[in-house]
Image (tube, grey):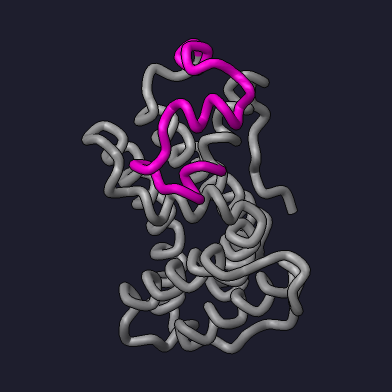
Amino acid sequence: MSTGRRTRAPGRDVVLDAAVDNFQRLGYHGTTMRDIARDAGMKVASIYHHFPSKQRILQDIMVRVLSDVIAVTRNALMGSGTSASEQLQAVMHAWALFHTTRRAEALIGASELRSLDEVGLRLVVALRDEQEGMFRAIVERGVAQGEFTTPYPQEAVRAIINMGSSIATWYRPGGELSPEQMAERYAALALGTVGAAARPT
C-alpha cells in the first residue's frame, strides 16, 4: 500500500527532509534555520526562496503529513467492503501502516502542535478533525446497526486513533513484526475495541 508521500520540488524536498530530521532530534524550538540549511546543503538565504520562515516549514510538514494520511485512509475506506467492521479494519490498517512508515513526520505532528501559530493551528486542527470524523462515522454506524457493542463510541474512536498513532513513538524497522504485520494486528485490536469480532485477513 502506498503511504501517500507526494512528489515535491527538489529544493523544497531537501529543506523539508532536513527540517524533519532536526525537528525530530532537537525539537522545533531547539532547531535553527542554520541547522536546517547545514543539513540541506545550502545557505540560510536559499531556504527563504522556498519558505518565508521556520514556522511555515513546520506548518508545511504537519499539513502535508495529515493530508497524506487522510488520503491513504480515505482510499482504504473506498476500497473496503460495505460493513462497518470491514471499513474500520481497512481504515485502521492504513492508519497503523502509515505510522510505521512515516514515523518521523508523524512524531512531529504529534509533539509540535503547541509550536504552531494561530493560522497553522487552525489548519492542522481542521485536518485532525477530518481524520477523526472518518473513524467516528464508521464506529457510530456500526453501533447504530448493532455491529459494534461498545457503549462508549466517542471514547472508542479516540482510543483507536491514539493507539495507531502511538506506533510512531516506538516502532523500529527490522523488529519482530513487519509494518504489514503490525497493521494487521492493530486492525484486529481496533475491532476488539468497538466490540466486534476480528475478520480474517
Dominant secondary structure of the residues highlighted in magenta in the image? helix
The residue located at (63%, 56%) in the rendering is 76
The C terminus lies in quadrant: bottom right
Please provide percent x and percent y for residue 57: 44, 30
Task: Please say if 198 is above or below 76.
Answer: below
Q: Nearer the viewer, residue 1 or 119?
A: 119
Is residue 176 among what the camera can see?
yes
Q: Nearer the viewer, residue 174 or 157?
A: 174
Please provide percent x and percent y for residue 154: 31, 73
**For residue 182, which quarter of the picture?**
bottom right
* Residue 71 within the segment the image draws in magenta: no
Task: Please say if 49 is above or below 82.
Answer: above
Is residue 82 among what the camera can see?
no
Task: Please say if 71 is above or below 177.
Answer: above
Relative placement, left or right, of 7 versus 71 is right
Please provide percent x and percent y for residue 32: 41, 32
The residue located at (60%, 76%) in the rendering is 186
The residue located at (45%, 48%) in the rendering is 26
**For residue 79, which quarter of the picture?**
bottom right
Please provide percent x and percent y for residue 51: 45, 19
The N terminus lies in quadrant: bottom right
